[in-house]
Image (tube, helix red, strand yellow):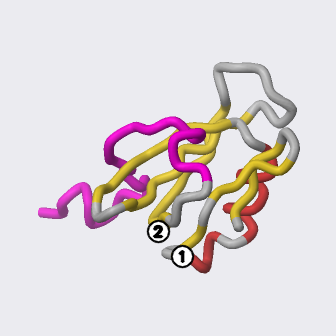
Amino acid sequence: MKRFSDFAEEQTLDGDKVKLDDILGKEIIVTGFNVNKSKYHNNSGNCLKLQFEHDGTKHVLFTGSNVLINQIERYQSEIPFISTIIKVDKFYTFS
């Protein structure tokens, strides 16, 4: 008999929820993500759920940042990677 985990393609992202502003400028290890439709109104209508590690603890955060969504989708083949998230003007970006 097959196990669900043998054929399921969904990626489970878990960890302590943190706010984006709480990790700005801190080095993190990005370990996973998914993008879904947002219940809030933003330019793309999408929400990024980002899974990462900081100081040995697994975390997740949620953001509608179009820049972060575009970057993580473009470089998803590089996961896991080390980065910081910074705020430039009113935009967030991986650095």
Q: How many marks?
A: 2
Label 2 neighbourhood size at 10 Å, few (<14), some (14-19), many (20+)? some
Left or right: residue 93 versus residue 12 is right
Query: Measured along the vertical axis of the image, is residue 16 above or below residue 12?
Result: above
Q: Residue at x 18, y 60 (%)?
A: 3
Task: Judge whether residue 74 is colored magenta.
Answer: no
Label 1 neighbourhood size at 10 Å, few (<14), some (14-19), many (20+)? some
The C terminus sits in image quarter: bottom right
Furthest-bottom residue in view? Answer: 78
Residue 53: give x, y in percent of width and height.
Answer: 39, 61
Q: Residue at x 77, y 31 (%)?
A: 45
Q: Residue at x 78, y 56 (%)?
A: 70
Would you identify the image quadrant in which residue 44 lies?
top right
Q: Which residues are magenta?
A: 1-24
Would you identify the image quadrant in which residue 1 lies?
bottom left
Furthest-top residue in view? Answer: 40
Q: Amino acid at mark 1?
A: Phe
Q: In this orientation, which residue lies closer to the viewer: 46 or 16?
A: 16
Q: In this orientation, which residue lies closer to the viewer: 86 or 10?
A: 86
Residue 65: give x, y in percent of width and height.
Answer: 74, 42
Tag of residue 29: 2
Tag of residue 81: 1
How far apart are the two marked residues, 2 and 1, measured between alpha carbons? 6 Å
Residue 43: give x, y in percent of width and height.
Answer: 86, 32
Of pointers 2 and 1, the one earlier in the residue sequence: 2
